[in-house]
Amino acid sequence: MVGVVIVAHGSFASALLTTAEQIAGKQEQVVSLDFTMGENTADLQLRIREAVRGVDTGQGTIIIVDLLGGSPYQAAAIVAMQQPGIEMVAGVNMPMLLEILPARNDKLMNVTSAALNGGHDGIRNFDIMK
Amino acid sequence: MGIELVRIDDRLIHGQIVMAWCKTMPIERIVVIDDEVALDFIRKMLLETVAPPGINVTILNVTQGVESLKTDIFAEEKLLLLVTNPTTILNLVENGLEISKVNIGGMSFGQGKTPVTKAVSISDTDKRAFKELHEHGIDLQIQILPHDTPLDLMPEIN
């Protein structure tokens, strides 16, 4: 099963995981990391590496981060560049995570596609006429 | 040359810069000055890719930074000057660059550092550099986000 590491500013990552588990049930091989004000990005990189080690059972890991260009994104990008078997997707939302969780028995590449599709498809403009 | 903001932030270009500062100030180019980052291929590439759309990024070492800023290469542009620590600014000032105000954004906690606020921790070297900058008459203010009330640094570290 593909491992999941969620990294985000504030308490978004832990809250997102807790919330997703309300719908998808308790999850194995998923870790959330909260990046708080004053934390060193080198420390964050270390925490990400450790988290990946913890959730990866050889099938690879997908790291999902909140904001393109933010510190979690940059720290995760460095980890992903230095180590094979890691995919990284930015812009995590509930629909994305809820698509990833049940898709994790598939190949890493397909989990990434599920993340991208789920994240995009979950954003719609409400129009009662359609 | 229009330096709109000089900021110390050891995360350099990140969420607060992209989503807050560059949206409230008319920044056209971010100039990162740091000897270590200028040599780090991966970080350099990342910083170049994470800048907000329409904003150029230049990453220079201190020597290049002094030269470029003094020769007005960026004369037509509104700049955000970003460094990771006050020593770099002191270097720029001692090499003749005129800076009147420094925004202190993020200096993360680590070994040998003393917390000043939640987001700002300083080492002894940082403290010495800040004191010298203060003696140069430079205004030093902690302000994480544009809507935060600036906090004068010197009374906090004396």
Image (spheres, coloured by chain):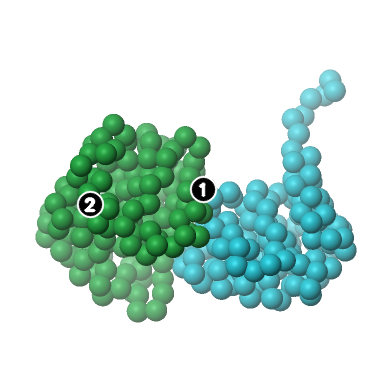
In the rendered view, does A67 fall on the left or right side of A96?
A: left
Labels 2 and 1: the sequence-earlier one: 1
Which dot, 2 or 1, sits closer to the camera?
2
- Mark 1 is surrounded, within 10 Å at the Cα level, by few (under 14), some (14 to 19) or many (20 or more) other residues, namely some
Q: Amino acid at mark 2?
A: Val
Q: Nearer the viewer, residue A19 or A116?
A: A116
In the rendered view, does A75 fall on the left or right side of B121?
A: right
Residue B64's label in the rendered image is none
Residue holding disc 2 = B66
Distance from Cα at disc 2 to Cα at disc 1: 24 Å
Whether B58 is drawn above or below A111: the answer is above
Q: Quadrant of the C terminus of chain A?
A: top right
Q: Position of residue B129 (x, y in %)?
A: 21, 66
Q: Residue furthest top?
A: A129
In the figure, the cyan chain has which letter?
Answer: A
Q: Nearer the viewer, residue A9 or B94?
A: B94
When asked about the image quadrant of residue A100, the answer is bottom right
Q: Amino acid at mark 1?
A: Val
In the rendered view, does A109 fall on the left or right side of A10?
A: right
Residue holding disc 1 = B50
Q: Quadrant of the N terminus of chain A?
A: bottom right
Residue found 44% across the figure and 62% down from its top = B40
Residue found 84% across the figure and 61% down from its top = A107
When asked about the image quadrant of residue A3, the answer is bottom right
Tag 2's secondary structure?
A: helix
Marks 2 and 1 close (CB-CB < 8 Å): no
Total marks shown come to 2
Would you say residue A9 is visible in this rendering? no
In the figure, the green chain has which letter?
Answer: B
Chain bearing tag 2 is B
Residue found 31% across the figure and 57% down from its top = B61
Q: Position of residue A58 (x, y in %)?
A: 79, 73
